[in-house]
Image (spheres, rainbow, N blue to C red):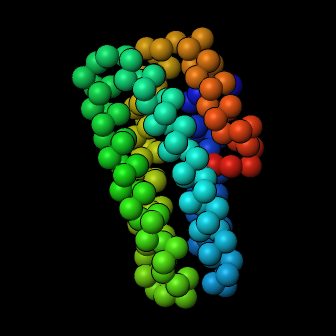
Amino acid sequence: MKATDLLKKQHRQVEKLFKQAKNTEDARGRRQVMEQIISALKLHTKIEEEVFYPAVREIGTSKAEEMIDEAFEEHHVVDLVMAELPKVDPEDERFEAKMTVLSELIEHHVEEEEGEMFPMAEKKLGSERMKELGQQLEQMAGGTTGRRAA
């Protein structure tokens, strides 16, 4: 599987989890879905930062550099929100507000990756390299790409 296909699959899985969180009524259920989202995002950002982004940086253009720098900063902001979420009671209205902010951050990040970074990576790195990266990402994800997300 190409790296971008695996990352897109994880994006779709996280989107589903956010929808599930929105439709979950009870506090315990919301907390469980939040924990799944955080786990999925931590895995996803780890494999992007350790394997995919360095490969995109290899492209060597200023556009690639800018995209990677911005992506790292977006991950940092997501990490800040994820660190706060478990401390907020799911019954508190701030919980839903933080989940909404996290969802919007992820949505923006996904749009940029899928709209700009992924097409550039596929074009510049080529099909064979994308498959190699996909194998590395799958290994790092522990073969859980069917169950995990981001």
Rendered image quadrant of residue 61: top left
Rendered image quadrant of residue 83: bottom left
Is the residue 1 above or below the residue 24 in the image? above
Of residues 136 and 100, the one nearer the viewer is 136
Q: Position of residue 122 (x, y in %)?
A: 50, 20
* Residue 150 visible (yes or no): no
Q: Residue at x 68, y 49 (%)?
A: 148
What quarter of the picture does the N terminus occupy? Answer: top right
* Residue 54 visible (yes or no): yes
Q: Tell me if 93 is positioned left or right of 25 in this view.
A: left
Q: Position of residue 101 (x, y in %)?
A: 41, 66
* Count of residue discs: 0
Q: Residue at x 46, y 53 (%)?
A: 107
Q: Residue at x 37, y 23 (%)?
A: 57
Q: Position of residue 102 (x, y in %)?
A: 45, 63
Of residues 55 and 107, the one nearer the viewer is 55
Q: Given the current orientation, which residue lies at the most extreme left position? A: 62
Q: Position of residue 48 (x, y in %)?
A: 50, 36
Rendered image quadrant of residue 145: top right
Q: Residue at x 56, y 60 (%)?
A: 38
Is the residue 1 above or below the residue 15 in the image? above
Is the residue 76 above or below the residue 2 in the image? below
